[in-house]
Image (tube, helix red, strand yellow):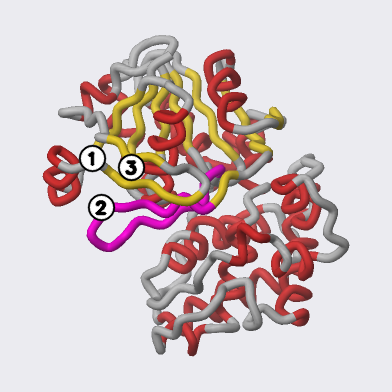
Amino acid sequence: MKISIIGAGATGLAAAAYLHLISVPFTIYVRNEEKRRLWETHPLNVSGKVNTSLYLPMARSLEEACEADILLVFTRAGDHEAVTEEVMPYMKKGQCLLFLNGCWGAVKAYRAFQKSPGAVPITIGETANMPFIAALSSDHASLHFKAMKEEIAYSAIGDETLLSELLHKLAPKVTRVSSPAATSLSATNPIIHVTQCLFNLSRIENGEDFDFFGAPLTKRTAAFMEECDKERLAIGKALGLELAPLLATLNSFRGTRAETLYEALTENPSYQAVKGPQTLTSRYITEDLPCGLASLLDLSDMMHVDCPHITALVYTMALYLRQPYRPFLTLQDLRVVKGLK
């Protein structure tokens, strides 16, 4: 089994470090020239849950990266469609394309492959959440590997044999869910991140150093998240999907049993190391809002599900940021979702 990593941010590098640790061959495709020049001559130093130093085996081109059995996509969710279009000409029958922290990547990719007359049959999958928590230093020389989740939920369209084999190497518990809609709707980050960001915007804009899941996360904030979660579950039900509540999903990551969402977020040792964003360009805002939370609003509109808390969250953030809400999912995406159930 040979792996290619597309996306050389913190989580992609965490995957590289872990694959190196368990002796799974891989290459990483690095588009950023500054990073490429550094890693050609210097090892990446990794500390935390994984302690190692490694020279990153880099693919010289996207075509070379696409020679692997499995392509792991670690880019921002808003780039998934562009990545799919770029790798499609090089992919061969039987290969796997896996979006980590899927956020509708599998649905978008499946629709793109269905539209392309020359596309070959491949396996397309995604995970519900990002298995790795990591932070890359500003000089790109070192990675703090903070944590790994104990359970990975994934979906797959096509032969999932290779995907299942790989994911079982990454986590002690792996769950196959019914469809890409189920994995995307099971993502925990959008509701948690965007809600906490909204109620801490002044801290973020002022560049304050604060613990994201520490004192700034109040019980009332967690209660708002729970209301958003009820609306997410209602959207899933309208699509014929039985989704797990946020609390149950967070408990599965640790193998513990917190009684409330507030406890699950504030008492998790992995989360205690998470710092709050210090700019409005954080992925918590630029990705989880337009791709993760907005997709819930899109589905609530298309499926006629009343979601006052999610609606208020999306529109308040959009107005504050002066960035108009734009639909992330289309009716064509919804048709794919319904067809893959």
User: Residue 30's mark?
Assistant: 1
Residue at x 87%, y 62% (from the top left corner): 259
| Label 3 Cα neighbours within 10 Å, binned few <14 / some 14-19 / many ≥20 | many
| Label 1 Cα neighbours within 10 Å, binned few <14 / some 14-19 / many ≥20 | many
The residue that mark 3 highlights is 7
Say whether disc 3 or disc 2 marks the residue closer to the N-terminus: 3
Relative to 96, residue 85 above or below? below
In whole angstroms, how far apart are the C-alphas of marks 3 and 2?
16 Å
Say whether disc 1 or disc 3 marks the residue closer to the N-terminus: 3
User: Residue 141's mark?
Assistant: 2
Q: Amino acid at mark 1?
A: Val
Q: Can residue 234 be seen from the camera position used here?
A: no
Quadrant of the image occupied by residue 189 = bottom right
Q: Amino acid at mark 3?
A: Gly
Q: Can residue 142 be seen from the camera position used here?
A: yes
Residue at x 70%, y 65% (from the top left corner): 265
Relative to 228, residue 112 above or below? above
